[in-house]
Image (tube, rainbow, N blue to C red):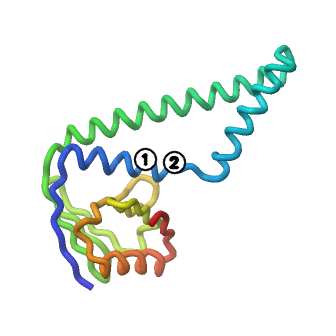
Amino acid sequence: MDAEFTVLWTVDLTRKAHWRLFRNLFELTWFRAVFFPLALSFFIIKLIYDPSDWSTMMIGCALAFLLLVSIFAWLAIARQIRGTARTFGEFEAVYRITEEGIQVRSPYGELRLGWDKFGKLYRASDIWFLVAGYVLYCFFPTDKLTPEVRDFIVNKITEHGGKVRGK
């Protein structure tokens, strides 16, 4: 398989891609979907029936702390996304997908990584993210990908022990 496509990255597309990545990294798992509503419900019940108990205050402080950390994390990421989009502006990137890996060329540099370096593939409806380690990722819009290339990427990631999330 050898496929090549060009993407015109605009400020809006860069912002959209980063927000999608942020949402995929912090998606709502069953633990978060069950734990937080239960903890909040327990806190409200304890607050109504026993507001002066030390455990009520501890639960309230823990929930307030989690809320503040979430808000500050969201603000920090939003600031970074705006800064990244402004810094790069509008540019063209050429993606080449081969049996060995993926290569991306842009005015800012070149990235070549083998399929074994990618540990995860996050699939959103319009953008895919290939993640290598914790800080290196490659994302691209899927409108330029044929179904064969999509299947090829998924197969290569899973073949090398990577995880595929999303549809």
Which amino acid is tagged 1?
Phe
Residue depicted at 22% across the width and 78% down the height: 3
Image quadrant assignment for residue 100? bottom left
Quarter holding the N terminus is bottom left
| Residue 133 quadrant | bottom left
Which residue, given by chain and number where applicable, does mark 2 sit on?
A: 26
Q: Residue at x 36, y 58 (%)?
A: 137
x and y percentages locating residue 52 in the rendered image: 84, 14
The local secondary structure at tag 1 comes to: helix
In front of the other: 40 or 114:
40
| Residue at screen point 37% across, 61% down | 125
Task: From the viewer's side, name the closer residue of 65 and 39.
Answer: 39
Q: Position of residue 64 (x, y in %)?
A: 64, 25
Three-letter amino acid code at disc 2?
A: Phe
Q: Does residue 8 sit above or below 65 in this rendering?
A: below
Which label was assigned to residue 22?
A: 1
Q: Are marks 1 and 2 in contact (CB under 8 Å)?
A: yes
**Within the image, what quadrant is residue 4 found in?**
bottom left
**Residue at 77%, 24% in the rendered image:** 58
141 and 68: which one is in front?
141
